[in-house]
Image: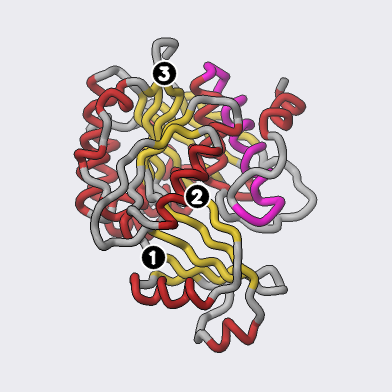
Amino acid sequence: MSDARLDILAIGNAIVDVLAAADDAFIEQEGLDKGSMRLIDAEEATRLYGRMAAGREISGGSAANTAAGIAMLGARAGFVGQVATDQLGEVFSHDIQAMGVEFSTPPIDADIPTARCLILVTPDAQRTMNTFLGAAQYLPAGAIDERQVRDAAILYLEGYLWDPEQPRAAMERAILIAREAGRKVAFTLSDAFCISRHRADFQGLIDEGRIDILFANEAEILSLTGAGSFDQAVAEVAPKVPTLVVTRSGLGAIGVEGGTRVDVPAEPIEEIVDTTGAGDLFAAGFLVGHARGRSLKDRLRMGAIAAAEIISHYGARPEADLRALIRARLG
């Protein structure tokens, strides 16, 4: 991996998170279910965005969160995702590059707005999310830079992006390039709903040996296998991938590599405030550890430390120095 220019190149949904304060009266007036998440169309996204109070706009999306965490851990990260030629597209591009992430995907020149998640935060800290996927669903295979993929030690793919046809083709092309270059391919299952829609495809990627590092949580690996127990699900999948990583919320995480299973506990924190981005930052910590040749146990602990930092506050961007936290706890 020493010849790689990037440690990890991530591909996923390019979404701008727009966070704004709102009172209960606004939520009720808009007919929203407080604390829920819904998918909305372009017209509703434009309308609601225009009615929201001034807020904070930051680059988001699962794999983008992971790429930002990787950069904050001092590793060399790149991200591939589709934005549009609009204000939020510029916000996404500027923000993720300011985090130290290489981002060079050309914006789409079409009447399709940049994806955004409009997050209304009420005084009781509830987050009501309204997501428009927009341009993120139109990442073409031609947007994959073959040299960039070959220059990355690890290619990291987000299962959420498997739904639309164009990004699926883009990711399949990236996998082919990475494998031909002898690079590692990491994949996160993302969500049990993604698995229910694409179980055969995901199982095919695993069975065909195209995945080197598979990330899942407990619900996802159970959904993927249909197994009756967690240990049974792990036993079914682990022999098919060189590295299997499964997070279990408060129960910690497990990793299986070369037939050896390692369990680590969750890192202790005073209070769980917001679990948004926990899995994304766990992946960041683990992947950085992998790129640096750390042991499986250390990689799992690096992921757990990063995840614990994220769930201790609102938002999916670390507020503490992750490198300092890991040095203090692991050395």
Majority secondary structure in the magenta region: helix
Q: Give the range drawn in magenta.
A: 292-315
Where is 71 relative to 43, above or below?
A: above
Which image quarter: residue 140? top left
Q: Where is residue 206 in the image (x, y as percent from the top left)?
A: 29, 36
Mark 1 / mark 3, whichever is N-terminal: 3
Residue under the image location 50 percent in, 66 percent down: 118
Residue at the far top in the pictured view: 2
Name the element at disc 3: loop
Where is 293 relative to 288, above or below?
A: above
Name the element at disc 2: strand
Where is 152 relative to 23, above or below?
A: above
Which image quarter: residue 196? bottom left
Give the residue type that dot 1 points to. Phe
Tell me the number on the disc at residue 132: 1
The residue that label 3 is drawn on is: 5
Residue 219 on the magenta span? no
Residue under the image location 70 percent in, 35 percent down: 321
Q: Position of residue 230 (x, y in %)?
A: 48, 47
Give the residue type that dot 2 points to. Ser
Give the residue type that dot 3 points to. Arg
Residue 232 visible to the viewer: no
The residue that label 2 is drawn on is: 59
Name the element at disc 1: strand
